[in-house]
Image (cartoon, helix red, strand yellow):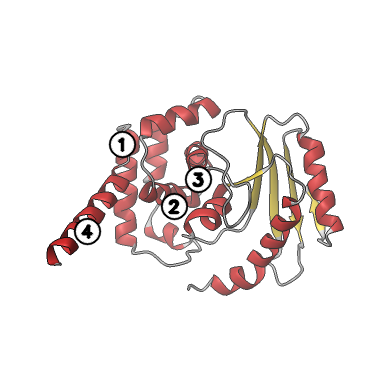
Amino acid sequence: MTEYSSYYETKLYPIQNEVLKSLSDLRLPFYLTGGTALSRGYYNHRYSDDLDFFANDDKAFLSHAELCIDRLISSGFKVDAEPSNSDSFSRIYVNRNTNGLNQEGLKIDFVNDVSVHFGSIENTPVFYRTDSVRNILSNKYTAIYRLSIKDVVDICEIAKNNSFNWNDIINEAEQKEAGIDLKEVVQIFKSYDDNSFKSIKWTKEPDYKILRSTVESVAYDMLTLADNSLYTLKQEKKRKKKADFEFER
């Protein structure tokens, strides 16, 4: 438990749950992605504020987004739509200034992404259509330029829990967004100090010395296009622990 737990567990997450339940009945092509999908669907490593729904090259994107908005309104939510001329993006705020939420309420983005997608859409505890960890990883890589510490934390969490090769991930990312400079990405990735990491709304505060070492390891693997060494090391520690246990028996 951290100082943020009460707000998220008793106020924001229940609203997220109601929204997700309401939209799941529509059976539309949107899937939950981003930090909330990663944390609530897979790792529970940090609290996340927004809901990001993506589709891939959906010709009926705008009408599908409108269906979602109409469903939320008919379900009793207060919905404020942000003006937009885009045919591939829509942003709304649910229950702004109500129900004890922060001033913006719950932000929801609908995005019509490129057709390229990696991994399978999963049924997770948070939503029946949740993005794959692999696809989230390549998206997080392309997002490093937005200078958000959350992307660094999420990439590290994925690296701790999955086997992959960085050359493969970067190739997949470049199929979505060309022209990303690997050296610049690594430089940004390593640039955050401990105060930046302390701004994350952790579900359980980490050891920042270990976290710093994790960041350095991921940055090195990324730069050298190597296999993800964090997961390999984790598996080796598990095998050693099991072997020691068997020996003691």
Residue receiving disc 1: 227
Residue 77, position in %: x, y? Answer: 81, 61
Disc 4 versus disc 1: nearer the observer: 4
Instruction: Specify the amino acid type for callout 2.
Output: Val
Three-letter amino acid code of the residue under disc 1: Asp
Question: Image point 65% across, 40% down: which residue?
Answer: 54
**Hey, what amino acid is under mark 3?**
Leu
Tally the marks: 4
Answer whether labels 2 and 1 touch (C-beta < 8 Å): no
Pick the residue in front: 245 or 155: 245
Is the C-beta separation of discs 4 and 3 under 8 Å? Answer: no
Helix, strand, or loop for circle 3? Answer: loop
Where is residue 233? Give x, y as percent: 25, 49
Distance between the alpha carbons at the discs numbered 2 and 1? 19 Å
Q: Which mark is residue 153?
A: 2
Q: Which mark is residue 87?
A: none
Mark earlier in primary sequence (2, 4): 2
Element assignment for label 2: helix
Q: Which residue is mark 4?
A: 242
The quarter of the image holding the C terminus is bottom left
Q: Which residue is mark 3?
A: 147
Going by the numbered disc 4, the residue's amino acid type is: Lys
Q: Nearer the viewer, mark 2 or mark 4?
A: 4
Above or below: residue 80 compared with residue 58: below
Characterize the local packing of mark 3: few (<14), some (14-19) or many (20 or more) Cα atoms within 10 angstroms.
Answer: some
In the rendered image, which quarter is residue 93 located in?
A: bottom right
For label 1, the crowd category at 10 Å Cα-Cα, with few meaning under 14, some 14 to 19 and many 20 or more, is some
From the top left corner, tell me how far across and down residue 197 is, in percent: 42, 58
Identify which residue is drawn at 23% across, 50% down: 236
Q: Do callouts 2 and 4 mark residues in contact (Cβ within 8 Å)?
A: no
